[in-house]
Structures are given as C-alpha cells and as structure tokens.
Image (spheres, rainbow, N blue to C red):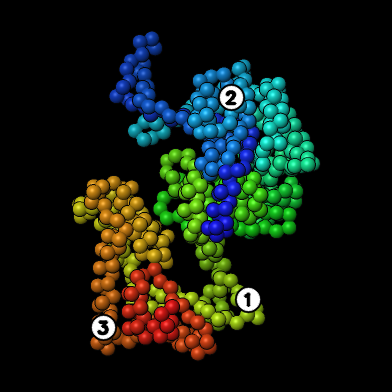
Amino acid sequence: MGRPELESLLADARRVRIGIVGDFCLDAYWDLDPTLSEPSIEPGIATRAVRAQRYSPGGAGNVAENLVSLGVGAVQVFGVIGDDPFGREMLRIFAATRIDAARMQVQAAGWNTAVYVKPVEAGTESNRMDFGNANALDPAVGGRLLASLRAALPSLDLVVVNQQLSHGIHTQEFRRDLESMIAESSRAARPVPFLADSRVFSDSYTGAMRKINDREALRLCGREWVGDEPVPLEDVQRAAAELAARWSTTLFITRGSRGILVQEARESHVVPGLQVLGPVDTVGAGDSALAGIAVALAAGRGAREAAELGNLAAGVTVQKLFTTGTATSAEVLAIGSDPDYVFAPELAADPRRARLHEGTEIEVITAAPAGRRITHAIFDNDGTVSTLREGWERIMEPVMIRAILGDGWRIAEERAYRAVQERVRDYIDTTTGIQTLVQMTGLVEMVREFGLVPADQVLDAKGYKAIYNAELLALVRTRRGKLDRGEVSAEDYTLKGSLALLAELDRAGVELHLASGTDQPDVEAEAGALGFAGFFKGR
C-alpha cells in the first residue's frame, strides 16, 4: 500500500462507525512517595503515601482510544462498569475523548469496575492490586447490553469483540447470545462484520473474523511454543490453515516483530514486520494492530490492506516507551509513507536454510523467474563491489560511544561504558545498510535518551555525521593514497570477481545502477578511483 492508498484509507476512517463490545478496564498508576509516609495511629504501621495518580482505559477501552487516535468518525462502546468511582472516571475519560459511552451498563451489585492498580515507587512497579476478579455478570444486565448492541447495529460499519477477563462479561450465556446476533447480522440486508480478539474463548464467536497472536494459534491447534524465540512461519501457516478451516472465517495472526499473517479461505498473505531502530515497548501493540485492522475493514478494504494498516499502527506504538500507547493517523502516515520492512527474517536467523547457487557460495534468496531477460541490475556499493570502507563500523562505534557519554567518556564507570557500548553495537548491527544520516538520526535519539550530555550540547544528525565522516574519510584517504602510489591495485579494494561481473553484464546490455548509504560525491569519486564508475554511467 503506497502513500496515496494510505492517505485515502485514513481519510475514509473519518466516516466509519465502529462499535466495541467487551471487557472495559482502567489502568491506574499511583506514584508512591515514602518521604510523605507517616504512622497510622490505629494499626500502628506506616502509611504508603500517593503523591500522584493517573488513569487510562485498558482492555476494550484501549482499543477504543486507538480507534479515536486513528481518526474514526464515531466510536460506540458496549460494556459493564460498577457503581463506583473507577467506573465514573472511565466514563469521564470517554467523554473527554469523544467516545460514545451512552450504552455502557452499570451493575451495582456483584460487580466492581475492572481496575489494574500499579503502585510505582522510585520508578519501580510493586505488586499490582486488581479490582473485578470476583465479578459475576447479572443475566439481566447482560441482556440489556446485548439489546443495546442489537439496536445500534444499523448505525455501525463493524463491531469489535474484545474478551480480556476471565470474570468479565463473556459468560457462556452471553457468548451464545452474541453468536446468535452475529449470525443474524450475516443474513441481514446490510450485514455488519464482527472482528473478535479473545484471550480465552477464541473458539466462540462463530461467524466473526479473528485476530490472535502466533502462540495462541499454535495453542488452539494443540501445540505449545516454549521460549522467547519467534514462532517459525511454517508453523504459523499450518496453524492458520487449520483454524481457518475450523472457523470458516478470515484470520489475522500477529507475529510480533515479524508482522502479520492473513489467512483467508483459499490463500494467505504475509505482511512483513517493520524495521524499528532503537528500543521498543510492545505494551499496547496488539490493541493498535486490532484497531488498524478494524478501521480498514470498516472502510471497505480487503484483509491484506487491513493487516498492512494494523502493522503500521503497531509499528508506531512499539516506539512509545513505558506507556500503553496509541497511534495517530499522522504518525501512521509518517511511518507508512516510506516504511522499511524486514525481509525473510527466518532465513536471516537460521543459516541452515540457505540455498546456494550451484557450484558457488552465492546465496539465492528468491529464484529468478523463468523465461525472463534481465534488463536492469542494482548493486550495493560498500561490501558488494567496493571494500574501500571495510571496517567502517569500527570507526562508527567509538564515535557513537563518545557522543553518548559526552566529555566524560574517558572516565565513565565501566558498567555505564559497557551498557552504552552494547547498545551501540546492537544499533550498528541493526542499521547496517541504511543511510548514514538515518543512522545519525538514531544516534541523536540515543544521546537524548541516556541524558549524559547537556541538552544544549546535543548535535543534530548532520553534526554527528560530519564527525563520523571526518574519521572515516581519513581511513579512505589512506587507502586511496596507497592506490594512487601503486602500492596496491583496484582488485585489492574490490570484491573478487566483481569488476569482471560488471563488465560481463555491461557487454550483455544490462543497465547497471549503484546504490549506497554513503554520500553520492564520495561514492562517485571512489568508483572512479577503483575503475568501475564507467559501468554505471552516473546511475
């Protein structure tokens, strides 16, 4: 999906109407301050003083917040809260964010608003306190909730079904009646699609599309994936085909950093993961993906486009640290206008999968189409043709470390130095192959994140690039000097056989193009010195 298609989709989001029925929760953050503690006279123990408190919707509420952030025209919520201060706070937040909560039901007896209270002291979260674990839905309240949803269906373009809590609204009776509504809607003159995201009851909600993650997909097929390693694509595809046949519906299976797999009746699509530079926080990413998928489906787009929008929304959210983030339409457009995708991650992670061209050590990623004549070829310069800049990472590493540690880099504690060094090495490894200026943009963010350099002394990306280029070009000039003096030949600073290959392709009439993350004038000068600039003719 290109920028014009993405812009059109986000514009269409402003006219869609989405309902959410599910488990609405409240995340409560209580910042504790032990300096404000005082003895409690009656029990004789010290109090735990709360300096500040803040609240944000969780569960189905966070999905609603994501829909609003993406610019959805109307969001209606259908759930149950208690007759308590937390429930009233949730309604206040919804009113402030233009979420229509007129159909939320209040159950006074046997129900507490679901709240996750997170006490935080000195930046560390202590034991969480949960409200709502003993909730029992009153059948009459559940009936009123479903009746309000049924009445609202003609005004909606899609309904999201959220199931978050073991003791929430999704009782056996509620699920049965909701399934009946889904079936009725599918037979209506204007069917309203349902999209379900359930932690516990994924086998319920017949007729609804499903959004699940890869580990849940395997578990539903009787297989467990143990450990932190990503689930292999082949295993996800087998599980997706099995579940699609079982449920007779479209599946969206999220795969973390490896994107989203879409399984339809007869075919599947893989939307690759986004390359995200820097640290990530996956809290809330699933809700953002669900919201993006829902928006596209409600706007009449196909499953693949829906997965692409969900993937972009999640790609925004994971970059928001230490918060249950949301993705705005502007942020999605920014990341989606020129996205960087991770290609063939399974192959990159497992060298045993490599297929080599017969009789060579050249790896074949995708086979060339049969019966086609190659007319254009693109070569990466550094490391594929030229080796003049071999060892650039050994220059970039100390430049970045010094930038982050600032003037005190020589006397920094070893633990701090090692932490920065590890972060820099990981960043360089992750960003190899992209433009130097983009790498330096990430360096600016790392300098600010570590906070060891005064704000007024932090350079911009061009400033750090100038420092790095000065040191790298010193190495290049030394090597160029040897070349100019005849101490070495072009073959010493080009990949073996590369010049002969370029000559052969040129004779065959193939139009050659040279790509590099290095500044163009430097690349042109080096290509001229090494004798292969003529093959590319300025391209």
Q: Which residue is mark 1?
A: 369
Left or right of residue 231, residue 396 in this image: left
Label 3: which residue?
482
Q: Secondary structure at mark 3?
A: helix
| Amino acid, disc 1 | Pro
Residue at image coords 49%, 87%: 506
What secondary structure is marked by label 1? loop
Q: Is residue 380 above or below residue 271?
A: below
Q: Which residue is mark 2?
A: 81
Alpha carbon distance from label 1 to label 3: 43 Å
Return the residue nearer the eye: 115 or 101: 101
Q: For the residues marked 2 and 3, what is the alpha-carbon distance in whole angstroms? A: 76 Å
Q: Can residue 413 be seen in this snapshot? A: no
Q: Position of residue 352 (x, y in %)?
A: 55, 67
Q: Is residue 529 above or below residue 152?
A: below
Among numbered discs 1 and 2, the one appearing first in the sequence: 2
| Quadrant of the rendered image containing residue 40 | top left
Q: Quadrant of the N terminus?
A: bottom right
* Vertical arrangement, residue 186 with respect to residue 482, above or below: above
* Label whose residue precedes the other's in the sequence (2 or 3): 2
Q: Quadrant of the C terminus?
A: bottom left
In the image, taking residue 484 as reference, residue 12 lies left or right, namely: right
Q: Is 485 on the left or on the right of 144, as rendered?
A: left
